[in-house]
Amino acid sequence: MLLIIDNYDSFVFNVARYCAELGHPAQVIRNDAVNVAEVERFAPTEIIISPGPAAPDAAGVSLEVVRRLSGRVPILGLCLGHQCIGAAFGGRIARAREPMHGRASAISHGRAGLFHGLPVPLTVGRYHSLIVAETPDFNRCLRVTARSEKGEIMALAHTDHPTFGVQFHPESILSEKGHEIFGNFFRMTAEWRSNAVA
């Protein structure tokens, strides 16, 4: 079962709808309605951590879910969820050079992972004033997979297991190829499970 942690974001049911359209219906829970042990009892096959208005340290269970379950359950973080992944692995949460609220932006990427088969540049919808900034700890276990035109981190991935973050909103009408990004996530998590069993 796909579990979506809702960080009080108005886009969360668009995320759930996109996933359902790809054959992955989700259960949505609020970030302050459960603890990590209760999240584990759902036995999720994947976890998506939604966008939201807070910083990672004020996002309920979201940050602790990344710290405790990354590597055991595939995780995709969106906007605030992406920042939770960055913070959990030693990244610094910083102010963006320019707040981006409801704006389309072109990003560059390496055509792999979440971006397999997608065009470069890719237009995405951005709704944030914070970003993940690199640190030595960040660079030990995370890699940057997409950047904005100004060089800010727009996507990241763990080097060893399926934990991914995107700073933008793939479910936004401003984003190109949103379904494909979610589809790539589900494809990679299925491959990871298959390899774990083999």
Image (cartoon, rainbow, N blue to C red):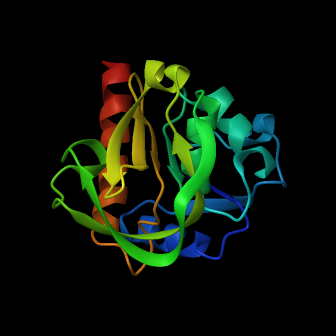
Drawn side of residue 178 relative to residue 141, left or right = left
How many marks do you count on the picture? 0
Instruction: Name which residue lies at 31% across and 23% down.
Output: 195
Instruction: Name which residue lies at 57% across and 39% down.
Output: 85
Q: Quadrant of residue 80?
A: bottom right
| Quarter that holds the C terminus | top left
Q: Nearer the viewer, residue 78 or 148?
A: 148
Q: Quadrant of residue 89?
A: top right
Q: x%, y% of residue 12?
A: 60, 69
Q: x%, y% of residue 148?
A: 35, 56
Instruction: Name which residue lies at 56% across and 38% down.
Output: 86
Q: x%, y% of residue 60?
A: 80, 49
The answer to whether residue 49 of the structure is visible from this angle is no
Q: Nearer the viewer, residue 98 or 156?
A: 98
Q: Nearer the viewer, residue 50 or 145?
A: 145
Instruction: Name which residue lies at 41% across and 66% down.
Output: 170
Q: Nearer the viewer, residue 181 or 43?
A: 181
